[in-house]
């Protein structure tokens, strides 16, 4: 059994901290990389060594392949873990690592490339018998062809732009009579948004659930799945709450989908950890969506129910070792939920909230895990994704898990930046959520105009007065750093590059 | 002692007396209560009200105190002190009338040039923070006098990025 002596973590924030933790448990030395804005970040403080990449802009730091590879060579790191985001799914980076003799802890560059191309991925899945969303392979302009395809796919159909996403050039058509007008309108919108009016069709899934399966594949041909995750609570296509098991899966369906996930990974020649995403229709049909060729943000909920450390598995696989787990070893116990804690203001359209974190008190207790990248005194940089931490909770069943998460959220105090914690509490307390009616339109359907319930103000007022008069332990003058942060006249000089 | 505290958009009248050691008697919005308190740390106070224990977590920021009770954080301000401070402080309330970012950001794109005529609401500067782009708009119809920043520059709330002279009337600079 071979193992790396030293690993460089090409990422930041909570995921870098989490990867470093497993490396330390395995006796592997760690190298952190950081931008100037992250000089005092937690991942830098926790690593054995740290290399400064340069200015804060991602292109100068966390996205800069040359600098990261140079840092690996300089420190003698034999492997690089890319985390999620940044370079994790960049086939050029995986290839550069291969060329430079540094092990990329993830799939081969070719697998990343093939699965990153949506039409290529679809063709691979169709060939291997993995169900895909019925739809067209190529864009089309002939209205007769389009109409015929729509008939074959079956209404409702979704018109999509070939050249881009984000909802532009998308139309849902439920009646054949509306079809040709919708095509004209979609093509016009696509042309204006992307300069290319090409459109194609897919079957539209009404009220789908987003269910994904974790897979692990070693370099000896062994592939297993580690059960599913349901990620239907999303806001603007960004996941905010994930859980496992999915309330919608029966053991039979789980088995079918798990086998399909393994087949998909095998068809793509996949190695290391990956996630196969499906859309689940209300009638139990499921369709391949895509493969995420990285460790995902929500991986901890799988770790909680299976007891398996996925980062550890990734490192073992990358070192060339055979998977010590068989499919029969994968058993899920209890229920787990994850809430992503972003620095965002839920009352101002979730605008990012930056600034200094004055105080943090983390929740504790049985079945509580908090993967965090922050601490009291840390200033959240503006240049990156505003994820502060992931709060993960495990309990014997779904109802207990929901109650445990609500309690943990209420115990999680972050002062200095705004977070959507009260919004998350309200989602978890919502009747539809408790019943497991978690479709991807959940937020729009139940929380479009959320306002927090204001209560207990008397106690807040009391606390204010007691603090003002009786608390000698904190100087009440406004902290100098805060005053400087808001006065342009004092700080313009500090921000010249 | 008397306070008017602004919490969650409401102005709450508070009258409080510190009687024995560790005891406060207060009337809040007309409701009377007696509470025992203990200062646990710089950021935590334990309150005992009607036999129920509650923890309050606190810190100060630029605008007042941030206080978390029962899982919700409130900004609490002394409304009387705010009234005294008045318009002297350039604050976030003035922003809509100027081309200035709502939060610390980076200038991504400057959409106008000095001398351009602009309409009210026309996009003037695009700034980026935490991977989100925001387009700052001209607050009124007028003419671009001066562009004060360059692409790639870091900018702060309160900083005027573009000077626009309002049509038909002179605007004070800065």
Image (tube, coloured by chain):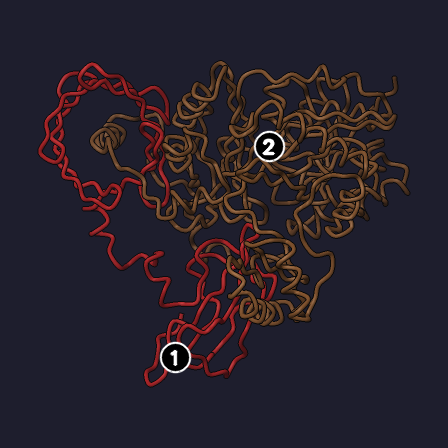
Q: Which of A151 and A398 is in front in this view?
A: A151
Measure the C-alpha gap from mark 1 to mark 2: 48 Å
Q: Which of marks 1 and 2 is in front?
A: 2
Disc 1 target residue: B141
Are both tags, 1 and 2, on one chain? Answer: no
Visual hue assigned to chain A: brown
Please indicate whether residue A88 sits to the left or right of residue A155 in the image.
right
Question: What is the x, y in percent for residue A34?
Answer: 68, 40
Task: State the image quarter where residue A62 is shown.
Answer: top right
Question: In what element is the residue under mark 2?
Answer: loop
Say above or below: A420 vs A244: below
Q: Which of B101 and A74 is in front in this view?
A: B101
Q: Quadrant of the N terminus of chain B?
A: top left
Q: Nearer the viewer, residue A18 or A34?
A: A18
Please indicate whether residue A488 sits to the left or right of residue A148 in the image.
left
Q: Tell me which chain the residue with mark 1 is part of.
A: B
- Chain depicted in red: B
Disc 2 target residue: A298
Question: What is the x, y in percent for residue A450?
Answer: 35, 44
Task: State the image quarter where residue A145 is shown.
Answer: bottom right
Visible residue check, residue A67: no
Question: What is the x, y in percent for residue B123?
Answer: 48, 71
Q: Which of A187 and B95 is in front in this view?
A: A187
Task: State the image quarter where residue A405 is shown.
Answer: top left
Q: Which residue is drawn at 55% across and 30% down?
A: A372
Tags 1 and 2 in contact by the CB under 8 Å rule? no
Question: In what element is the residue under mark 1?
Answer: loop
Visible residue check, residue A250: yes
Q: Tell me which chain the residue with mark 2 is part of.
A: A
Q: Which residue is drawn at 25% across and 25% down?
A: A470
């Amino acid at each position: 059994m071979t193992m790396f002596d030293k690993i460089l973590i090409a990422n930041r924030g909570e995921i870098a901290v989490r990867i470093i933790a497993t490396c330390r448990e395995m006796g592997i030395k760690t190298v952190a990389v950081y931008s100037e804005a992250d000089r005092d970040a937690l991942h830098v403080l926790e690593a054995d060594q740290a290399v400064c990449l340069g200015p804060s802009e991602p292109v100068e730091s966390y996205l800069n392949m040359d600098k990261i590879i140079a840092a690996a060579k300089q420190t003698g790191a034999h492997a690089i873990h890319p985390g999620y985001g940044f370079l994790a799914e960049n086939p050029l980076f995986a290839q550069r690592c291969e060329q430079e003799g540094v092990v990329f802890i993830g799939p081969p560059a070719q697998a990343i490339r093939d699965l990153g191309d949506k039409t290529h991925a679809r063709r691979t899945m169709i060939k291997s018998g993995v169900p895909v969303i019925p739809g067209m392979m190529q864009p089309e302009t002939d209205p007769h062809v389009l109409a015929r395809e729509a008939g074959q796919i079956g209404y409702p159909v979704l018109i999509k732009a070939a050249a881009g996403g984000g909802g532009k050039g998308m139309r849902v058509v439920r009646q054949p009579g509306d079809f040709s007008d919708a095509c004209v309108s979609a093509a016009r919108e696509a042309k204006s948004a992307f300069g290319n009016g090409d459109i194609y069709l897919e079957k539209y899934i009404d009220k789908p659930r987003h269910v994904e399966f974790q897979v692990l594949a070693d370099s000896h041909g062994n592939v297993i799945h580690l059960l599913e995750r349901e990620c239907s609570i999303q806001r603007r296509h960004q996941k905010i709450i994930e859980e496992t098991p999915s309330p919608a899966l029966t053991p039979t369906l789980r088995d079918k989908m798990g086998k399909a996930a393994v087949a998909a990974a095998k068809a793509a020649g996949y190695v290391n950890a990956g996630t196969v995403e499906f859309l689940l229709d209300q009638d139990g049909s499921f369709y391949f969506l895509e493969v995420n060729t990285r460790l995902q943000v929500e991986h901890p909920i799988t770790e909680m129910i299976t007891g398996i450390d996925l980062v550890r598995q990734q490192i073992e696989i990358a070192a060339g070792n055979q998977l010590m787990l068989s499919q029969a070893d994968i058993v899920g116990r209890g229920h787990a939920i994850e809430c992503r804690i972003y620095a965002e203001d839920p009352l101002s359209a979730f605008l990012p909230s930056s600034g200094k974190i004055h105080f943090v008190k983390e929740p504790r207790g049985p079945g509580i895990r908090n993967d965090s990248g922050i601490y009291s005194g840390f200033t959240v940089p503006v240049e990156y994704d505003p994820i502060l931490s992931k709060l993960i909770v495990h309990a014997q069943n779904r109802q207990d898990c929901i109650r445990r998460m609500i309690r943990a959220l209420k115990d999680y105090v972050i002062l200095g930046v705004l977070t959507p914690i009260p919004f998350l509490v309200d989602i978890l307390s919502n009747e539809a959520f408790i019943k497991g009616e978690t479709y991807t339109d959940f937020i729009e359907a139940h929380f479009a105009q959320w306002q927090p319930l204001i209560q207990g103000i008397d106690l807040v007022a009391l606390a204010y007065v007691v603090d003002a008069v009786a608390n000698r332990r904190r100087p009440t003058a406004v902290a100098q750093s805060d005053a400087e942060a808001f006065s342009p006249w004092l700080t313009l000089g500090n921000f010249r590059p | 002692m008397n306070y008017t505290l602004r919490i969650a958009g409401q102005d709450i009248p508070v009258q409080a007396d510190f009687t024995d050691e560790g005891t406060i008697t207060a009337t809040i919005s007309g409701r009377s209560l007696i509470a025992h308190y203990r200062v646990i740390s710089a950021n935590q106070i334990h309150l005992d009200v009607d036999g129920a224990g509650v923890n309050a977590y606190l810190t100060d920021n630029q605008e007042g105190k941030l206080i978390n009770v029962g899982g919700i954080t409130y900004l609490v301000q002394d409304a009387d002190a705010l009234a005294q401070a008045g318009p002297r402080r350039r604050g976030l309330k003035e922003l809509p009338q100027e081309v200035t970012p709502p939060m610390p950001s980076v200038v991504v794109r400057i959409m106008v040039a000095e001398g351009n005529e602009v309409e009210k609401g026309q996009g003037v500067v695009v700034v980026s923070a935490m991977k989100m782009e925001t387009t700052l708009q001209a607050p009124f119809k007028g003419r671009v006098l001066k562009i004060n920043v360059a692409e790639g520059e870091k900018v702060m709330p309160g900083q005027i990025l573009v000077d626009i002279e309002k049509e038909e009337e002179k605007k004070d600079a800065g």
